[in-house]
Amino acid sequence: MSHKHKLLYVDDEPINLQLFQINFQKKFNVLTADSAIEGLEVLNNNTDISIVISDMKMPLMNGLEFIKLAKERFPEILYFILTGYGLTNEMSEAISSGMIIKYFSKPFNLNEIETTIEIALQKNMFG
Amino acid sequence: MKLYNIKFKWNLFLNSDKILKKYTEEDFIIQLKARFVFYLIIGFVAALLILIPITTIIQYNNLSNQGINRPLLMVELTLTIALVGYLYLVILGYFRIVSHLILVTVFVTIWLVLFLDNSNIVAKLDTIVYVLVVLSAAPILISSKKKFIIVYTFGNVLLLVVFSIIVNKIYVEFGKTIFDYLLDTTMAMIFIGLVAYNNFRINNTALEKANNDIKAREEAERLLALSEKKYREMTEFLPQTIFEADLSGRIIYVNKFGLEKYGFTINDVKKGHYITDTLDSADIHRAKDNIGKLIQTGKPQTNHYIVSKKDGTKFPVQISTSLLKEDDKVVGIRGVSIDISELKRAEKEIKESRDQFQSLVENIPGITYRCKLDDNWTMLFMSGEIESLCGYPSSDFIQNKERSFASVIHPDDSKSVTFVVENAILNNNPWEIEFRIIHRNGHIRWVYEKGRAIKDDKDNLLYLDGFIFDDTQRKTAEIALTASEARYKHLFMTAPIAFSSVNLTGEITMVNKVFTDTLGYTIEDIPTIDFWWDKAYPDDKYRNEVKDQWGKRIKNAIINKTLVEPGEYILTDKCGKEHTMIVGASVHTDYILASFIDITERKIAEKNLRQSEDRFRAMIELLPHSVFVSDMKGRLLIINDAFCNELDCTKDQALGKTPMELGYLVDQNTQNEVSYLLNKIGVAENLETTIIKKDKSISYVYFSCRLLQFNEQPVILSSSINITSKKQIENELEKYRLNLEQLVKERTDDLAVANEELLSANEEYQAINEELYEKNQIIKKQNDDLNSALKHLKETQSQLIHSEKMATLGVLTAGVAHEINNPLNFIMGGYIGLDNYLTEINKHNSTTAVLLESIKTGIERTSAIVSSLNQFSRDNEIQSENCDIQTIIDNCLVMLNNKIKNKISINKKYGPEHSIILGNVGKMHQVFLNLLNNAIQAIDDYGVIEISIDKQENNLIVEISDTGHGISRENLSKITDPFFTTKNAGEGTGLGLAITQNIIKDHNGQLKFVSEINKGTSVIVSLPLNTQQ
């Protein structure tokens, strides 16, 4: 791997942030944020981020609200949700409208996340 | 034995071939020379090793010589060491150098001894002899360059001269004698040198010549081999069999073609195969004779034989043989065998065709004969074909040698033959006659004979001439035809239809049995067609009508060459009874065949049926409800007045259309239900449904229908009873009831107060007590009404509470799921991180594997439970989600796992690959959780739950059967009622199945129960599949 993609992970649980960083740092350059607000700040400071994965249920602003804001400013980034909830109506709407590519459920599946992102990146590059 | 062993060891020790293997590539002479030098050096060394101690001892003992002669001893030792060195060099392959070194060494040694020896002159001069000896050995040592011999010779001569001069100075007293001696020696040296030189040259030249000879011979051999190979190959590939055999007949060579042709392998030949082995046994003797002739005369022989291949198939060959000679001596024979099967076959074909031609000539049909006119028909001549006709040769009949011709004529025919022939002769006519002949094998042959009598000038009969033809085939056909006619007649007589046959003169020639049976007339009753007309049609007018019609029809049939058009007529039988019959006929060249089919019975049946149908129609018309019969496509066939009134249309407008076209819309659920029921049981009864009419007004009806067979077609008889007004009244009542409840509630409160007041004032108001009592009764009644209303309210409230509870539960589980999933995510992250970390630092072992695996399994299992919980929390009302029933049932089983574990075995029979219906995922979970939970609770100790999923037409059928305690017949109808429960208080609300029923109804599905006490219950859920998906 000549170049690691920059990935932002947003979750209000610090343990989740730490573990995500440890487990995905081999494949991605992982940045973390513990809230939607901080997530937007990180995005502003790192315009080369290509992937964003966000938790759904967070205080003040939930994952989809955060992604909606972020996508307005950074439409090129690939957005995903990682949540402990099952598939809700608003989530399936977000997928069908193309706001997010996919939702991952907690507890996360490392392989599923890595493969999905890789495929999405390739599609993004060629299409 | 012992000696041999020693020799063996010695050989092992000095095996020159092994030691001198460096020379195997050299020519033979060098090899020999090298071996000689090798042994020579060994000899020298051995001699020196013996010599040195002996000379030392001699010198040591001979004190007069002042002890040991050190220079001599040194020379000897040096020589020994040098020789050992040479030996090594020889082994290394430096024979050429060593040979020179030896010569040089020996000469140097000899001359050193000569110069250094202090002994007397004679002893000194002796030593020169050694020079001569060594010089003579030079050609053995020297390998290639003969000039070296000259060099050595003259070197020694030179040294001798030098030596002479020195000796002459020392030993003056010898003077001339020494010179003479030296001269002689010099001459001897030169002579030996010359001899050695020539010896070497002759040897080498001879060797060269021998080498050239060998080369020439090798070349000649090579050419020979080449040519032999060429001939052998040519022979091998010749397309004929070539073989050689020795004088015993044993085959010693067969070419490749021959091996293939005869099916042998080269090994078969090698094993020993004789010429006679392939020859046909009949030919062996002849072949031996021929070979004998060949050997005697020496002339090549060509003969034809039959030979056999290895597999036994035989074929003809032409074999040409010649003698095989070696040095003019006969050693065997050589042969070429040519397959002449084709030739033979061609020959045979020609012969066959010739034979055929001959037989053709011989087989011109007809037997000519000449015979006498006597009882025996004595034959004078008869052609040979008679044999094929009667099985006896013609010679048998000539002059009645074996038998007379009369004896083969069928005895029944012999008289008529004699009669016909004699008659013809008498009238001077030729005759033709057919009669039978009895063949030798007993078969009868029909013959046709044509003959005439030959007379002399004086009209005296000389003999009879004629032909006899075999006529059996034609005659047999004729007989068969007669038999067939009889068969048809029989058929006619016994046919199951009445027939009569009338000829052209109007004569009735035949009537069959059925005719007589049906109409009673025999042929005697109706000898002509006129009798028939009068009897069968007694009414004049009708008869004339029929006659007229028939006349036309028969005319038409004759013109168009068709059958006579059948017609329906009323015929009177012999007893005067009338029959309705279909009469048809076919016109033939000389007769008319008429057929009569009695349809009287059918007519009566038809009439009865029509009457019954009329009755039925009248009844339908009288019914106050809509009644209609439609075909399977819904088109109306029969409708009554009530139906027309209901739809406000006339009968003519309605018939042939569908109710829908007339604006009679039944709601979709009912349609589904009706078609389901009709398919299943053929009847749908009293379905309460709504109908939307043309003017959009809604009617409530009880709708019934039933599948019927009508005129052998499936039809649907439907009826609908309008209950709109009844329904309206019900609705009014319901409204009224609700008002009443409210009223009662208000009034009860008032009354309660009033009641108390009344009670306290009881004594005071004794007078009006009775009145009050009366009122009380009214109140009591009202109270009862109120109570029942309350009970109903309570039920509604409970249902509300339950659905609220379910909704709350949904929210709750969703929250709980999320809260569990988050820490599960920590554990999963920790697990993956730990796993990777251990891999990185290489600290994985079996214990860590078990520990990590347990963490992972734990996460997975918890996650599965949470995810199935999640399915219930789906709070949407969407009815169009894809519900995979298999997955949903599996989810429910996860949820119920703790109740199932160790108690119940689950038996899944998932038929179709896809079991996806459209509906609400959360509610479907609720349905199957409920049904599975019931099944589990029905099982007290141990049992089986079988879950089967299957497709039937457009429905998904899920059947859940348990082996539990079952449901009694009276309870079975009540189990879907709200609040009906058989469980103990607290265990069930009695709402589960009611809600399940409702959800399934919302999904256009059906729920059915089949149960038997103590055997178990089967729940059958049928849900419509969305076929578009």
Image (cartoon, coloured by chain):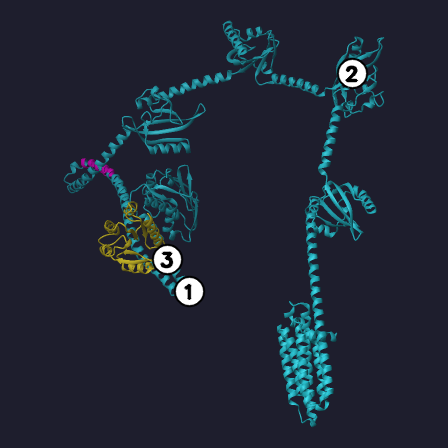
Chain colours: A yellow, B cyan
| Labels 2 and 3: the sequence-earlier one | 2
Can you see residue B975?
no
Residue B186 lies left or right of residue B293; in this view the side is left
Horizontal relation, residue B391 to residue B522: left or right: right
For marks 1 and 3, give the one nearer the viewer.
Answer: 1
**How far is the residue under mark 2 from the one under mark 3?**
119 Å
Q: Residue A41's image quarter?
A: bottom left
Mark drawn on residue B624:
none
| Mark 2 to mark 1 CA distance (whole Å) | 122 Å
What's the CA distance linking mark 1 and mark 3?
A: 20 Å
Disc 1 residue type (three-letter): Asn
Pick the residue in front: B550 or A75: A75
- Residue carrying label 2: B466
Near-viewer residue (A60 or B693):
A60
Residue numbers of the magenta segment: B771-785
Judging by the rendered image, the residue that carries numbered circle 3 is B858
